[in-house]
Image (spheres, rainbow, N blue to C red):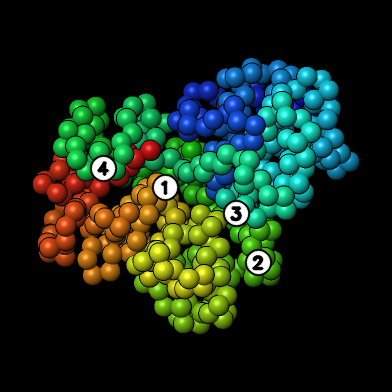
Amino acid sequence: METLFKKHQILISQVSMKIIREIMNDINWEKQLVAIRGSRGVGKTTLIRQYIKQKYGVQAGKALYCVMDSMYFTNHTLLDLAEHFHLVGGKHLFLDEVHKYPTWSKEIKEIIDLYPDMKVTFTGSSLIQILNADADLSRRVLSYQMAGLSFREFLRFYKSISVPAHKLDELLLNADSISHSVNEICRPQLLFEEYLRVGYYPFYDGNETEYYSRIENVISFIIDQEMTQFCGVEPAYTRKLKAMLMYLSDNVPYEVNISKLSSYLEINKTTVLNYLSNMQRAELLNLLYSDNKSVTKMQKPDKIYIQNTNILYALGTQQNIGTIRECFVVNQLSKEHIVEYGKAQGDFRVDGKITFEVGGKDKSFDQIADVPNSYILADFIEFPIGKKLPIWLMGLLY
């Protein structure tokens, strides 16, 4: 136990407080049981360490931070830890990467039952199923999903430029005034192009080669470790998943031909659909359907996008600007909104009521001329032209 306290002190003292994600203020840390899920690399570990440092200071005492693959758990249980922590006056247990501990859900349930005055906050992969865990925690856990950086957060994180977040309806209604306010403090178009390449993950240090290498490592870990653990993928087939991702990165936005994909990967169609679904859960892909309400479990998607533009740049041998634009729009809108494939009327339908067509500055309204509540999201413009809006505005949603 003393070893854990020492490790806590070292790790909490090392964390930088220079940039703190705004999700910090959105989380109700006072709830007894809080879950923070998200893809590997988006900053979950940094977030909880920062909160501990801000709330409790560096010394372990009232709070204790543990990584769940610690050697401590080779001969101790999570329940043992909670009991000892409670005996020394501990009040808030932070468990990082909880999915690395096999019986996490059962033991966390026991902890909050045995020690009602103890709070437990845990992080985990996007793939962990809280609702279907061995012990049903769904009624008691307050769950948050953590995404990578928005364009707005990138401006703050890397450029020290503060821009407020806006709801989608507000962005559409006040696009002109919002665009002008941003342009008064920076040149958003130039910075937006940088964001598309290196702005999504909060670990860019100025070296693109190393950044893309780290993204590849993140992807390999998700496929080799997490998808084999949570999705039932046989280790021998992880190469197929990587081949699928590489294929899609060079062909997205991919209008789905399951037979062609099945033939390319030399696996059956059912397995292809299962892999696609799990890769969306793992936040490596975004699957779009023309009608989300009627989607069945093994229905083929209408369009497939790589989850974010930085993965496209890291994996894709050819970067198509149209693909990159659409990938960005789907990524940013999907966090808080339902995005559907627009088919013949626009590229995307959002929340069943807003239609977006995506393109360059010369994009015409021909495809959405008669569609109500429709807009063009255009690249390479800094101010709205009627209902043609700068595409980077979608990066101010969170």
Crowding at dot 2, Cα within 10 Å, few <14 / some 14-19 / many 20+, comes out as some
Rendered residue at 32%/30% (across/down): 164
Determine whether the residue tagged by mark 1 lies in a helix, strand or loop.
loop
Name the residue type under label 3. Leu
Name the residue type under label 2. Val
How far apart marks 4 and 3 lie (CA) works out to 31 Å
Name the residue type under label 4. Asp
| Closer to us: 20 or 122 | 122
The numbered mark, 1 or 2, whose residue comes first in the sequence reads 2
Q: Which mark is residue 169?
A: 4
- The answer to whether the residues at label 1 and label 2 have Cβ atoms under 8 Å apart is no
Give the image quarter of residue 150.
top left
Q: Position of residue 50 (x, y in %)?
A: 57, 26
Q: Which mark is residue 233?
A: 2
| Closer to us: 73 or 139 | 139
Q: Position of residue 10 (x, y in %)?
A: 70, 24
* Position of residue 83 in the picture relative to residue 208 (left or right): right
Q: Check the image and report above or below for 361 versus 108.
A: below
How far apart marks 2 and 3 lie (CA) works out to 13 Å
Rendered residue at 49%/23% (across/down): 18
How far apart marks 2 and 4 lie (CA) works out to 41 Å
* Position of residue 325 in the picture relative to residue 251 (left or right): left
How far apart marks 3 and 1 lie (CA) works out to 16 Å
- The answer to whether the residues at label 1 and label 4 have Cβ atoms under 8 Å apart is no
Quarter containing the C terminus: top left
How far apart marks 1 and 4 lie (CA) works out to 15 Å
Q: Which mark is residue 127?
A: 3
Determine whether the residue tagged by mark 3 lies in a helix, strand or loop.
loop
Q: Position of residue 202 (x, y in %)?
A: 48, 38
